[in-house]
Image (cartoon, rainbow, N blue to C red):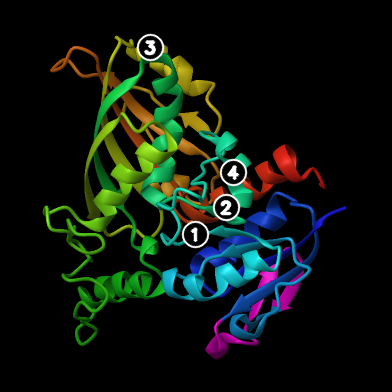
Amino acid sequence: MGYKVVVCGATGNVGREMLNILAERQFPVDEIAALASRRSMGTEVSFGDKTLKTKDLEQFDFTGWDIAFFAVGSDATKAHAPRAAKAGCIVIDNSSLYRYDPDVPLVVPEVNPQALDGYARRNIVANPNCSTAQMVVALKPLHDRARIKRVVVSTYQSVSGTGKDAIDELWDQTKGMYVPGQERAPQVYTKQIAFNVIPHIDSFMEDGSTREEWKMVAETKKIVDPAIKVTATCVRVPVFVGHSEAINIEFEDFLDEDEARDILRTAPGVLVVDKREDGGYVTPVECVGDFATFVSRIRQDSTIENGLNLWVVSDNLRKGAALNAVQIAETLDARILKKG
């Protein structure tokens, strides 16, 4: 017996990817509904070999439905996720709204599946930030071996993390560099994104950090270990899909790079591609459409006593959002609900 599943925000990048992944991974679905805002009502979306017409999220009755994936942003989530949860539908939310709520599990299934045991307190499970999700998949198996003290991470985040309008802006600005009359001024971003990088994701905070950087700090502590110190610099780059991260790790105990490589090779969700030769590493273009978090450039940091450097790449629409949400549902099914 399967589940009655709802995908909210089904016309967006992440919502469409959720539908694709649910079909690809053959999640046990008996019935599925695709929801969107009223202006997108009736838009057709694909679920495997089926075509679904979206329904109005505002008018939808969640009674009798089992699982609702939310990919609609914090405002719409705040309005509709509580009523879905109250109706007995388990909410798996991709927004930032519930990530820091102590009564809501924040889950990356390869890292902290045990956190799902507390889902019933609010009937809501939070999906982490895209940049955090791929990082903690790589950090956790190393932390289990040598205990991480401090992480310094610089991100190279694709425009798809901002949404469809950002993808269009990069495309149009790129064309405008070559086609007279096709120039496009920045609208989504504060500066030109084509042939540029922007060290600014989300809003600025009082200490000079951006909220994206703060998210990586707070979420790593909640998912992996509150004792880990994290400092982040998050940068938007002119890449359509795929986030990359340069990660420097300081451990309590010494961890040899060869042992680290072996640990990561057997870690769930990780694929190591690490050859010290031209092209012996993974770039964002190569990770698109893949489920894995790729780790390359594993090497000792000789400037500190117990340090390693990593290069981590993942499809942000998949592991950073839709895939992780579906994996949460799969883990709930296997660990708690046992209906599949």
272, above or below 86, in the image: above
Which one is in front in this view, the residue at disc 2 or the one at disc 4? 4
Judged from the image, the secondary structure of the residue bearing numbered disc 3 is helix
**The magenta stretch spans residue 267:** no
**Which label sits on residue 118?**
4
Answer with left or right where residue 128 lies relative to residue 17. Answer: left
**The magenta stretch spans residue 50:** yes
Magenta stretch: give its range: 37-52
Look at mark 1 in the image and give the residue it sits on. Answer: 94
Look at mark 3 in the image and give the residue it sits on. Answer: 258
Answer with left or right where residue 207 lies relative to residue 89. Answer: left
Which one is in front in this view, the residue at disc 3 or the one at disc 1? 1
Judged from the image, the secondary structure of the residue bearing numbered disc 2 is helix
Residue 156, how many percent across, how many down? 27, 49
Q: Pointer 2 and pointer 1: residues touching (CB < 8 Å)?
A: yes
Which residue is found at the position 57% from the left and 61% from the top? 17
Which residue is found at the position 41% from the left and 36% from the top? 136
Q: Earlier in the sequence, mark 2 or mark 3?
A: 3
Separation of residues labelled 4 and 1 (CA atoms): 18 Å
Q: Pointer 4 and pointer 1: residues touching (CB < 8 Å)?
A: no
Q: Residues within 10 Å of mark 1 (few under 14, many from 20)?
A: many
Look at mark 2 in the image and give the residue it sits on. Answer: 325
Q: Residues within 10 Å of mark 4 (few under 14, many from 20)?
A: some
64, above or below 211, in the image: below
